[in-house]
Amino acid sequence: MNILEKNYWLETVAQPAIGSREDLPGRVDVAVVGGGFCGLSAARTLAMRGVRTVVLEAETLGWGASGRNGGMVLTGMKLPVPTLIGRYGRSMVRRMYAASLESIDLVERIVKDEGIECSFARCGHLEVACKKAHFEAYAAAAEEIKKEFNHELRIVGKSELRGEIGSDIYYGGMVDGASASVNPAQYVTGLAQAAQRAGACLYDHARVTSIKPQVIAGSRSLLLETARGKVSAKEVLLATGAYTTEATPGLRKKLIPVGSYIIATEPLPAELARELSPWNRMIYDSKHFLYYYRLTPDNRMLFGGRAAFFPESESTVRESAEILRRGMIEVYPQLAKTKVEFVWGGTLDFAIDVMPHAGKIDEMYFAMGFAGHGVAAATWMGAKLAGIICGDADDNPFSKISFPGAPMGLRSGNTWALPLAGAYYRVLDWVM
Ligand SMILES: Cc1cc2nc3c(=O)[nH]c(=O)nc-3n(C[C@H](O)[C@H](O)[C@H](O)COP(=O)(O)OP(=O)(O)OC[C@H]3O[C@@H](n4cnc5c(N)ncnc54)[C@H](O)[C@@H]3O)c2cc1C
């Protein structure tokens, strides 16, 4: 295969977001560490509310998961609703689910208000069942979601599935019309430019290497050392996701980094694209090691998966291309002769309980654990935390749940055990 090892989405960004070339200011109200959806959404809200804000990004703006994901703007959370209710109770899960729906509205509103050209569309998502038992569970899930959250999902039996997807390998599906699609690199670029317009100062290539509390003239602040100098901030928001470093060891200890990879084919003829995905839904399957796929606005099949349980590297990216191509052809034999043009990888931020978390750690605000739902959820959480920093009441359900640490072997930086965890989930897919 002659494939470009690069992120297809970046090819579609006309004007990348560029950080400030000026020196860092000595003092600010809030320093946001990390320039992805979460950090940039927070910075936009903070700046709009008149707060002096810097964003410190180690690489380029949007470099992390935000610029390289599948662009699926999804309702719900990673875990099934019955599991969530069992863990957190009905009323808490109602608030979480409402937040998930609100987060898609927020992305839509930002895109519209800021005039971001990123092909946002309410195309809905389709979950497809790899096993009969998975399909049988859909009806109960849809009923529970209707009852608890007054949100409608549609069950699609095997005989009608061809109206939703040009594949015969699944046992049925479930459609949620509220989910949306976006070009994530264009969206994160637009979000950065919106934050800049609102007055936030964005710095790229400004890796934060240490954060220490200090007291000057009786008032407490935090001193951040970066690759571009020092800055003092009254508050710090950690929005470093799966790429969290040793600069914040308390948060890093909680993180389980999971690699995920995507291929993109050459553009498909319009008729074939329509056959594969008549409504251009965001599609994912029901396995633990799931595949997720969609058409791009120029009709490429973008096919992702193969969580490798360790961060991406050149060799894992290369290996993944062939594995994903085989997976894609199992789903869509029609693509056997189609050229794969791009492959890239990224790292997802998981918490051990597979939930998003936010609040304070080591005297700093933080949000992480978005897993495969971060396009909408990280945007929402950033804006929510910004409001709380400005003094809004903390009604964030995700800051009310406990945030368990990752077991020693699975911690970020301790990745020897991650392939074992991967093997465990493969076994689950086999038996469940
Ligand atoms: C391959 C892939 C596919 C995905 N598909 C989807 C999808 O279809 N739908 C969905 O909802 N979610 C998806 N996700 C998840 C989603 O992309 C993330 O949850 C989301 O982007 C997280 O945003 P964030 O702002 O928290 O983190 P990120 O976008 O990862 O940003 C964190 C930033 O912090 C910076 N940073 C880290 N440490 C430091 C430091 N010390 N100093 C300065 N900067 C630092 C990093 O350079 C990085 O740019 C996918 C993720 C991957 C990897």
Image (cartoon, grey):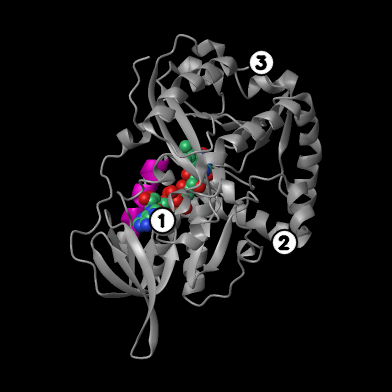
On the picture, is 343 further left or further right than 139?
A: left
Q: Which residue is mark 2?
A: 92
Q: In the rendered image, which quarter contains the N terminus?
A: top left
Callout 2: helix, strand or loop? Answer: helix
Point out the stretch of residues depicted in magenta: 184-195
Is 239 magenta? The answer is no
Q: Is mark 1 within 8 Å of ligand 1?
A: no
- Residue 148 appears anywhere in the view: yes
| Relative height, residue 316 to residue 404 (above, below) | above
Marks 2, 1: nearer the viewer: 2
Q: Earlier in the sequence, mark 2 or mark 1?
A: 2
In the depicted structure, whether residue 206 falls above or below residue 323: below
Q: Is residue 186 magenta?
A: yes
Q: Position of residue 224 (x, y in %)?
A: 33, 68
Q: Position of residue 196 (x, y in %)?
A: 30, 60
* CB contact under 8 Å: marks 2 and 1: no
Q: Secondary structure at mark 3?
A: loop
- Where, by quadrant of the figure, is residue 296 drawn? top left
Residue lying at the far bottom of the rendered structure: 218
Ligand 1 is within 8 Å of the C-beta of the residue at disc 3: no
Q: Quadrant of the C terminus?
A: top right
Residue identified by numbered label 1: 113
Residue beneath disc 3: 168
Above or below, 22 against 104 in this view is below
Q: Could you classify mark 1 by the number of other residues whose Cα lies within 10 Å: few (under 14), some (14-19), or many (20 or more)?
A: few
At label 3, which amino acid type do we have? Asp
Q: Amino acid at mark 1?
A: Asp
Say which amino acid is labelled 2.
Met
Seen at 53% across and 11% down, the residue is 334
